[in-house]
Image: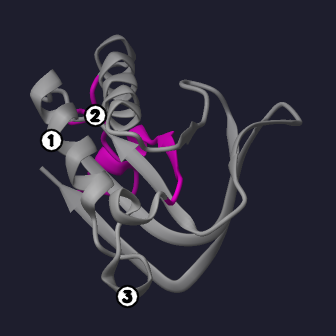
Amino acid sequence: MKAVVARVTEASVEVEGEIVGAISEPGLLVLLGVHHDDTAEHARKMALKLHGLRILDDEQSCESTGAPLLVVSQFTLYGDTRKGRRPSWTAAARPEHAEPLVNAVVQELRQKGARVETGRFRAEMKVRSVNDGPFTVIVEL
């Protein structure tokens, strides 16, 4: 499992002209990719990592501040561009495997008390954000 995590002052996801998820205060925008070998245990560990990731102001986390997260599924994080000019998607999980694991990350975050907004799985999304810093990290398991 892999995530690109940006510290943001606000972020939103739009599908077909409708805002389906948004945070309007400082928090994290999480672009989440699922590998074809990932399991429910990976989802649990990723949620714990995201919740406790100390990249907010003064090295705080969503866990310590109550800051929100906007989680957006992003299979393209597993695009392999080492050969040629067209990415290969062989490492990315198939939708029927990835969707339950993305949902498991969101559910685990919510069980930990996190405020979580989401995009819409398999939808054509427009993601908007105002990066803070900018401060962006890659989290891999």
Residue 133 in the image: above or below residue 51: below
Which of the two discs, 1 and 3, labels the residue nearer the N terminus? 1
From the image, tell me which residue sits under label 1: 45
The image position of residue 10, as x and y in percent, is: 68, 65
Q: Are marks 2 and 1 in contact (CB under 8 Å)?
A: no
In the displayed structure image, the side of residue 125 where residue 5 appears, left or right: left
From the image, tell me which residue sits under label 3: 58
Q: Is residue 2 magenta?
A: no
Q: Residue at x 70, y 51 (%)?
A: 12
Which amino acid is tagged 3?
A: Asp
Element on which disc 2 rests: loop
Which numbered disc covers residue 92?
A: 2
In the displayed structure image, the side of residue 44 where residue 20 appears, left or right: right
Which amino acid is tagged 1?
A: Lys
Element on which disc 3 rests: helix
Element on which disc 1 rests: helix
Q: Residue furthest right?
A: 17
**Mark 1, other Cα within 10 Å: few <14 / some 14–19 / many ≥20:** some
Tell me the quarter of the picture where residue 107 sits: top left
